[in-house]
Image (cartoon, rainbow, N blue to C red):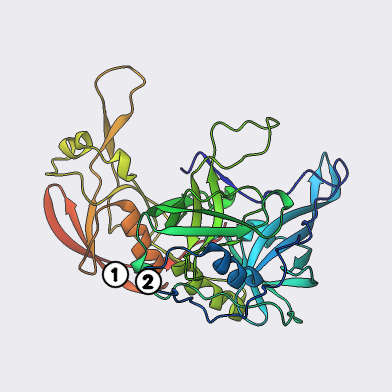
């Protein structure tokens, strides 16, 4: 996922070599809903009622916007203007939520609402680590409506129907339908300076997401936002070979992170993440061979590969100190040996390194002490670490 995922909503070529891309104007049937607005979340008409997608679209479309983003980039040694497109959703009466990779570095933002009204927006906060940004619109149209975040994120289930609404390829107010394909994925933040950190608890969906959908909402059938569309999985996309497009595997930043980060971005303009200062083995690489080489009964827990020398876990946790070569071809991957395995944090079981990342990210704040239960040299013991503030860049 981390190597193949592509951020959606990438800006087009610089204006010096291509015409600016503008969001398409709403077409017939995409303007104001004819039915009166209902309270969100929507209630089904009857207990046995199926998905009423036209009703859902009419009620939530006023909360989705298209974004035209202007910035200056270096193009062959020259500073040239560039315009890209993306999506967002109305968070409250003054703010739009979108992706950091859409609007974080914007010099100018045009917000286009579902009924064709245009407003100027200003970035008031951005966070590269969660790929979230907040845009302020001082004169929000009366026709716009705020979309609620899902009340109980833990209630989401794989197989649950969802819809994505956004501005793919400049086609504003487009809705696609699919299901939650998986929960609890961890994806890269998607920027070179922060690739060593991941975004936990992300949602995988097969609802079609394409370039321009970035920042738009992924919603359940009651009209609640469950995630912010951010990345798609593509197959060997080479530079110059075409635009990355949907392949049925998309990822959305979870509403649990939106609820945690966005209010702080509105208030402070930035968000500070907790930092344990370790690198770990991914779940798919924590194999039975790794467990056997480390005298572990099973391949469960967060295997620590490296303890960063400037991090808070120095002299507390231990990373792998050597490796043994696997049998077979000479280019086979070595098996790490000697690393600590975290099996619980503050009494909560840890099954994978993603679990550890999720807990540190969502349940702790910089300066907070956490109690880790680890396996070291075949013995269980407890250690305490005071998490630090995640370094910038």
| Residue beneath disc 1 | 370
In the visual, does 350 lie left or right of 80?
A: left
Residue 135: image location, x then y, percent: 68, 71
The nearer-to-camera label among 1 and 2 is: 2
Dot 2: what SS?
Answer: loop
| Residue beneath disc 2 | 364
**Residue 328, can we see it?**
yes
Looking at the rendered structure, which numbered label has been put on residue 175? none
Q: Which residue reaches farthest top? A: 329
Name which of mark 1 and mark 2 comes first in the sequence.
2
Quarter occupied by the C terminus:
bottom right
Dot 1: what SS?
Answer: strand
Q: Which residue reaches farthest right? A: 16
Q: In the rendered image of this protein, does residue 114 appear above or below residue 36? A: above
**Residue 134, can we see it?**
no
Asked whether the residues under the numbered discs 1 and 2 touch, taking CB atoms below 8 Å apart as contact, a structural biologist would say yes
């Amino acid at each position: 996922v981390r190597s193949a995922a592509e951020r959606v909503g990438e800006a087009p070529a610089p204006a010096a070599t291509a015409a600016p891309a503008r969001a398409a104007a709403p077409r017939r049937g995409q303007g104001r809903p004819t039915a009166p607005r209902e309270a969100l979340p929507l209630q089904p008409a009857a207990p046995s009622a199926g998905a009423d997608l036209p009703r859902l679209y009419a009620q939530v479309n006023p909360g989705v916007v298209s974004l035209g983003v202007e910035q200056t980039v270096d193009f062959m040694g020259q500073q040239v203007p560039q315009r890209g497109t993306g999506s967002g959703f109305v968070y409250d009466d003054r703010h739009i939520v979108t992706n950091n990779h859409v609007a974080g570095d914007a010099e100018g933002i045009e917000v286009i609402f579902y009924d064709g009204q245009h407003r100027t927006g200003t970035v008031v906060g951005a966070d590269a680590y969660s790929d979230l940004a907040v845009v302020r619109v001082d004169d929000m149209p009366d026709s716009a409506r705020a979309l609620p975040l899902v009340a109980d994120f833990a209630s989401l289930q794989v197989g649950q129907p969802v819809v994505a609404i956004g501005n793919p390829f400049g086609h504003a107010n487009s809705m696609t339908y699919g299901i939650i394909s998986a929960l609890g994925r961890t994806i890269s933040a998607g920027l070179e300076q922060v690739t060593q950190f991941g975004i936990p608890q992300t949602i995988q969906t097969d609802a079609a997401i394409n370039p321009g959908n970035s920042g738009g909402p992924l919603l359940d059938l009651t009209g609640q936002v469950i995630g912010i569309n951010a990345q798609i999985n593509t197959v060997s996309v080479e530079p110059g070979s075409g635009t990355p497009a949907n392949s049925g595997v998309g990822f959305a930043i979870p509403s649990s992170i939106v609820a945690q980060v966005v209010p702080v971005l509105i208030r402070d303009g930035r968000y500070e993440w907790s930092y344990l200062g370790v690198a770990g083995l991914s779940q798919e690489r924590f194999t039975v061979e790794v467990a056997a080489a480390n005298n572990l009964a099973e391949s469960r827990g967060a295997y620590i590969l490296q303890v960063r020398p400037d991090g808070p876990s120095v002299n507390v946790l231990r990373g792998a100190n050597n490796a043994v070569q696997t049998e077979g071809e000479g280019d086979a991957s070595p098996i790490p040996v000697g690393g600590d395995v975290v099996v619980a944090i503050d009494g909560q079981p840890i099954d994978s390194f993603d679990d550890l990342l999720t807990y540190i990210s969502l349940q702790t704040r910089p300066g907070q002490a956490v109690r880790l239960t680890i396996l070291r040299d075949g013995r269980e013991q407890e250690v305490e670490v005071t998490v630090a503030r995640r370094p910038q860049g």
